[in-house]
Image: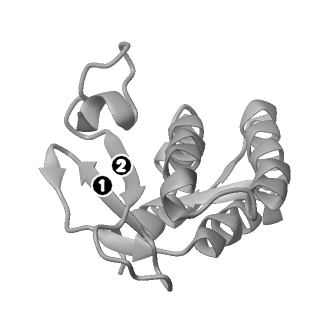
Amino acid sequence: ERGSRGYSPAGGTPPPAGELSVTVAAAASEDADEPYAVEGTFAGRAHPRCRRRFSSFETLLQHLAASGSVLVCSTAVRLTPAAQACIEGWSSRLGYEHAAAGAAGHAPLLQQLVDDLLQFQELRDSDLLHAFVFDD
């Protein structure tokens, strides 16, 4: 399930070691403050789930869009125009989707957001995305 819902370069197969896979789900508890569980796998190793709010995903997009580049291992890497368009599109979409559904209804939307971001190497490797997924 993790391979099919996170980044999967070959149509549903798990990512190779060294790749980032992310799963977003409604948290098991009824924690209204942080209703999403984000679980990441990197280099074949699963990391503990962290909890995020809907606004955390909006903030992630704002930070990714802010400079037109991201840090990868502390080195600035320019975003491709396609990656920038993806970030801008999702920023607009999250703005109007926020009030449309409860936490469980947003989980598939947020999973699609993460899957779309992971299609771009510079985003997949970015320090910011790794911090979002792995830092609690």
Quadrant for the C terminus in the image: bottom left
Measured along the vertical axis of the image, is residue 84 above or below residue 134?
A: above
Residue located 48% across and 57% down the image: 104
Left/right placement of residue 1 relative to residue 123 reads left
In the image, residue 51 lies at what x, y percent? 38, 75
Measured along the vertical axis of the image, is residue 117 above or below residue 134?
A: above
Measured along the vertical axis of the image, is residue 64 above or below residue 118?
A: below
The answer, for residue 15, to whether it is visible in the render is no
Between marks 2 and 1 in the image, the one whose residue lies nearer the viewer: 2
In the image, residue 19 lies at what x, y percent? 31, 39
Measured along the vertical axis of the image, is residue 8 above or below residue 33?
A: above
Pointer 1: what residue?
Answer: 40
In the image, residue 8 lies at what x, y percent? 36, 26
Residue located 38% across and 55% down the image: 25
Pointer 2: what residue?
Answer: 23
Q: CA distance from mark 2 to mark 1?
A: 6 Å
Q: How is the image coloured?
A: one colour
Residue located 25% across and 41% down the image: 18
Q: Secondary structure at mark 2?
A: strand
* Residue found at the far left of this picture: 45
Quadrant for the N terminus in the image: top left
Left/right placement of residue 4 relative to residue 83 reads left
Q: Name the one closer to the observer, 123 or 32.
A: 32
Left/right placement of residue 80 relative to residue 122 reads right
Residue located 32% across and 28% down the image: 4
Numbered marks: total: 2
Few, some or many residues within 10 Å of mark 1 (<14, 14–19, 20+): many
Name the N-terminal-most of marks 2 and 1: 2
Q: Name the one closer to the observer, 115 or 96.
A: 96
Labelled pair 2, 1 in contact (Cβ < 8 Å): yes
